[in-house]
Amino acid sequence: MDKKRKELKVSAIRNGTVIDHIPTEKSFQVINMLNLNESNHQIYFGTGLESKKFGKKGIIKISDKYFADEEISKIALVAPSATLIEIFDYEVRKKESVHLPERVEKIVRCFNPKCVTNIQDVPTNFSVINDHKGQMKLACHYCEKTMAKENIDFF
Amino acid sequence: MKDLKGRSLVSITDYNREEIIHILDMAEDFEKNQRQQILGGHVIASLFFEPSTRTRLSFESAVQYLGGSIIGFASADTTSVRKGESLKDTILTVSNYSDLIVMRNPTDGSARYASEVSPVPIINAGDGANQHPTQCLLDLYSIRKTQGSLDNIHIAMIGDLKYGRTVHSLVQALSLFGATFHFVSPESLKMPSAVKTWVKKAGLEYHQYTDIMDIMPIADILYMTRIQGERFPDPLEYEKVKNSYILENSMLETSKDSMRVLHPLPRVNEITEDVDDNPKAYYFQQAKNGVYVRQAILAAILGLK
């Protein structure tokens, strides 16, 4: 595939953010989680695109939008392999992999229905840990339960 | 060691090895000399949002042996919680009337939250299915007293290892002392992977069994827990295993002379009454140790010792 045809797959943006290297099956989850379906920004996205690293990947381009740390934490939880590229006037200003934060505050619900954060007006707070199999998990600061990735539910 | 004065005790992991040993040493002193009027003029609030026999009464007993006063409630029914008052408001109010709050609450994580909003220290007397650190400390005290040391013991934990909060905390605490763990349970009530991860990260060994007799000659401590029928998704499975984890006196024959049987109580039928007269039965003495340990915790947090 020549360079020109590859560029045509998803249009370039003048200003905004590109989220690249999303595991293809997570593309729609990232869109929903960031509420991009309700946004007024111009959004281009593709899934099932060829990728040397992943086989298949998703990519999302959002015009005139730069993400706050809290939103980047959300992306890292769902798609830890993603790359965030900030564009200014068609030029790449910043390109970096998303990083899992040490703590995740206020953006994820605790999966334990008996946790105080689900019963009283208490903001959630988790530490990001790895279990003995190296799987990422969230440990609730309050009820001390650990939550697997598949149980993560954003507010 | 950081000073324990003014620090809440929410989870057993709030204390390191040295701090645990310090509390146990203090408790040993209170066992030798229980009546010490060091809490005179102090008011302790005891907020029990759900029922308890041993924990509430042994805390009240500990406060009174130390000459302190106690206020509080044994059920949330007679309080403003019934009118919908938040936990935060209850804690902020009660902290105006007391030097320290002992709290049991059915909500997981409520004690950590209370400790964050309260200007006075909180002692967690059980937060739902989560933590019960004073039980853990009295278990450690009982193990050290009967075995002479906490180091490198072989502990067998029997029964409901999936939901039993006391066994989870005890694994966390004993991991600081190099124990070997023997987990005996039906397939559906095995120790959760998070707890096993804890053991592995501490570089320690655990073994899993379904037959209680397998660990009888090895164990220094048999830590019994109750299996509740409602925990089983399939009632037939409960019927199959319910009698396999009942300890009878004759089963103790192959155990070490120094082995002791512990149980956080209340027991229902998991230890038959013929075990009570065996010198290896230690669960009632264990409950008594709870008073010395709670005296030590109160004195340490109030900075009176």
Image (cartoon, coloured by chain):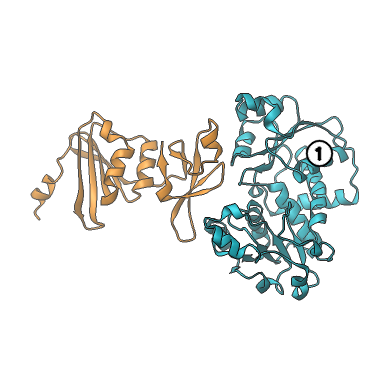
Chain colours: A orange, B cyan
Left or right of A95, for residue B284:
right
> Dot 1: what SS?
helix
Q: Which residue is mark 1?
A: B60
The amino acid beneath tag 1 is Glu
| Residue B51 position within the rendered picture, expressed as x and y whole percent measured from the top left | 71, 40
Q: Residue at x 85, y 35 (%)?
A: B39
Q: Is residue B180 visible?
A: yes
Q: Is residue A67 above or below residue A20?
A: above
Q: Residue at x 68, y 24 (%)?
A: B93
Left or right of B225, for residue B37:
right
Q: Residue at x 80, y 45 (%)?
A: B296
| Residue B258 position within the rendered picture, expressed as x and y whole percent measured from the top left | 80, 69
| Residue B115 position within the rendered picture, expressed as x and y whole percent measured from the top left | 64, 35
Dot 1, how many residues are within 10 Å of its Cα: few (below 14), some (14-19), or many (20+)? many
Q: Is residue B80 above or below residue B274?
A: above
Chain holding disc 1 = B
- Quadrant containing the C terminus of chain B is top right
Residue A92 position by quadrant:
top left
Q: Please tell me which residue lies in front, B230 or A148.
A: B230
